Amino acid sequence: MSVAMAAKKWARVKRSGAHGLRRGAWYAVVNEASPDLVVVDVNKRNVPVPRGLVDTSDATPDLWSVVRWEQSERGAQRASEANYGLTYLVCPRCRARVRPDSEEVTRMPCPDCGGEFGIDWENPC
């Protein structure tokens, strides 16, 4: 007798908030039973995030997330201090952040995990 395993779902934060998670990084969904919250696994710690602050996916993420900051946003200063600029990419596999050479780039290797992925310019966070 085999028990069917539930398909793994994924969520990424699209806006900053009290949850403290980085925008653009994909996390495995642990629980989404609440209509208002999605609980994600962050380094073996369950973190509840308001459902309205996340994008979800039924498929394993395979595109770089594009994070865009406005100069006036609090996170823009941190991104600039880290030399990422106001637009940077987040690896779908390891969550590394990199600054793209230009917005014409369509694929990019990750300097941390070595994976090569397309870039999701159409759905910035």
Image (cartoon, helix red, strand yellow):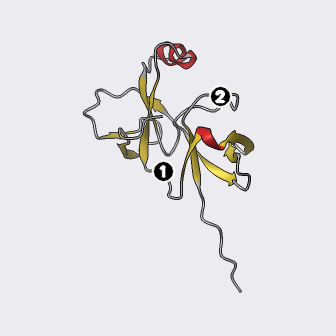
Q: Does the CB distance between marks 2 and 1 fall below 8 Å? A: no
Gap between marks 2 and 1 measured at Cα: 22 Å
Q: Quadrant of residue 51?
A: top right
Pair 2/1: label in front: 2
Q: Which residue is mark 2?
A: 17
Q: Secondary structure at mark 2?
A: loop
Which residue type does callout 2 highlight? Gly
Residue 41 is left or right of residue 100, and the answer is right
Residue under the point 73% across and 41% down: 47
Q: Is residue 15 above or below residue 35?
A: above
Residue under the point 57% across and 51% down: 10
Residue 48: image tag:
none
Q: Residue furthest left?
A: 104
* Picture coordinates of residue 81, whole percent (x, y): 50, 13
Q: Secondary structure at mark 1?
A: loop
Residue 89 is left or right of residue 118, and the answer is right
Label 2 CA crowd tier, 10 Å (few <14, some 14–19, many 20+): few
Q: Is residue 100 above or below residue 72?
A: below
* Picture coordinates of residue 58, whole percent (x, y): 53, 58
Which residue type does callout 1 highlight? Pro
Q: Which residue is mark 1?
A: 61
Q: Nearer the viewer, residue 27 or 13?
A: 13
Q: Quadrant of residue 101?
A: top left
* Picture coordinates of residue 44, whole percent (x, y): 72, 45
Label 1 CA crowd tier, 10 Å (few <14, some 14–19, many 20+): many
Quadrant including the N terminus: bottom right
